Image: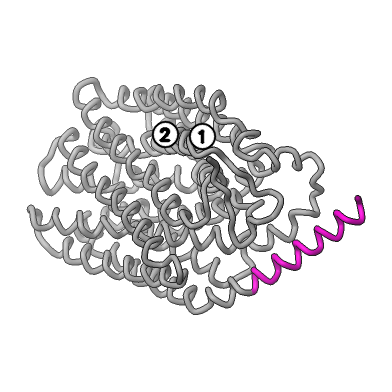
Amino acid sequence: MAFHTSAVDDDEPGSVGVARKYAWIVFALTFGLLISDYMSRQVLNAVFPMLKSEWALSDGQLGLLSGIVALMVGLLTFPLSLLADRFGRVRSLALMALMWSLATLGCALAQDYPQMFIARFMVGVGEAAYGSVGIAVVISVFPKHLRATLSSAFMAGGMFGSVLGMAFGGVIATKLGWRWSFAGMALFGLLLAVLYPIIVKETRIAPQRAAMAASEAAAAVKRPLRTLFSSRSVIGAYVGSGLQLFVGGTVIVWMPSYLNRYYDMGADKAGGVAAIIVLCSGAGMILCGMLSDRLCHQSPERKIALAIAYCLGSCVLLSLAFALPAGPAQLALICLGMLIAAGTTGPAGAMVANLTHYSVHGTAFATLTLANNMLGLAPGPFITGKVSDLIGLHAAFQWVPLVSIAAAVVFFYAKCHYHNDIARLKGEHVDDSVSKNVVFEVKS
């Protein structure tokens, strides 16, 4: 049995059928590499207290070590994803995993802050396009009606990787030292980087695409590339998603330090409790994505309405949480807020897939990743660290949830234009298909 992918534009000759079993193998391996990606990225958070003490670092310096990865992801995701779309996504994913794993090993060997900064810089270079190219591979082997679920489930791998990175990182650091925390994450990534290209083959996930690649001219992708920014609703999806991840990303990065300072937890316990909070966020991404697909199958605009609800709901819950003193009630509200804080991931991913051309989906998700990192994941931890140096981490956390209000406003703007943008893109797609058929008949 095979899945047959389709979309607003996926009924073109590039669409493929992929066996169900192989599709899930592709998903599992790609998901596993995403977990490795975030384990390597977030293990740093678990050892923040140790680095702060050993190297006498400020919160601003610690935030920069985290933010530099997201910054490089934001700056490089677009060009590297574009290259991956042109020269082979599978090969590109394996090379990315190899690079970030070796760079994580470099973190374990760093002797001072500058060396650690360089190693983290290279982790960011290696991870730059993985999320966007990886999700493009995943959605290419599954049906269109599962896009919100797959987008949220796949990106939830980042949350699960964060959970494992912080939980295992904290335990390993307590028992063996912080250097072994980085080394353990690196070895896991290297193993998957070797297995991935052996099992996942470009010709199996997109046989027609591979056959056509050699004959495609550069001009043939100019019009599909324009779909990356051709509608107000897709731009709204990029910006709204990025602003909302400012909140979730900041809480994830600083939560182990928050627990260490205000709950007097050691690195291992703080990493474990923070991992539970991140796990709530990852589970929420999947549940919110599934809810979006189930409730909005006949009305895609409702997905955007749900995204707005997720933004405002997380703002209320997290604002209440950080208005409370340390204690069980605060932790419960943080868990509830994080359960829906990243719920916009599925709707935003579905919007981007539906509003862009299938041949540039890797680049489209790179643009989404660019917005997520440049508007959220990169500035969030750094700005919060700087504010924390001035007024304390607890006070800084009280301001963070308010960014969700801006995200809700942007998603509302996208909702106002979504229906018309989809209708216009369908019309352009029909025109493109007719033109291609005419050219084919002339050549024949």
Mark 1: few/some/many CA within 10 Å (<14, 14-19, 20+): some
Q: Is residue 168 above or below residue 262?
A: above
Q: Is residue 210 left or right of residue 384?
A: right
Which residue matches tag 2? 32
Dominant secondary-structure state across the stretch colored magenta: helix
**Tag 1 and tag 2, C-beta contact below 8 Å:** no
Q: Amino acid at mark 2?
A: Gly
- Give whichever of discs 1 and 2 has the lower sequence position: 1
Which residue occupies the foreground of this view, 206 or 159?
A: 206
Q: Amino acid at mark 1?
A: Tyr
Q: Residue furthest front?
A: 1
Which residue matches tag 1? 22
Q: Is residue 270 above or below residue 251?
A: above
Could you give the CA–CA distance between mark 1 and mark 2, rounded to whole angstroms? 15 Å
Q: Is residue 392 left or right of residue 127?
A: left
Q: Is residue 385 left or right of residue 135?
A: left
* Residue at figure coordinates x 82%, y 42% from the top left: 215
Magenta region: which residues? 424-444
Q: Position of residue 275 (x, y in %)?
A: 24, 41
Q: Position of residue 117 (x, y in %)?
A: 43, 36
* Residue at figure coordinates x 30%, y 68% from the top left: 402
* Residue at figure coordinates x 45%, y 59% from the top left: 375
Q: Secondary structure at mark 1?
A: helix
**Nearest to viewer (mark 1 / mark 2):** 1
Asked if residue 186 can be seen in this view, the reply is: yes
Q: Position of residue 209 (x, y in %)?
A: 69, 43
How many discs appear? Answer: 2
Check residue 259 for magenta coloring.
Answer: no
Which residue occupies the foreground of this view, 195 or 69?
A: 195
Q: Secondary structure at mark 2?
A: helix
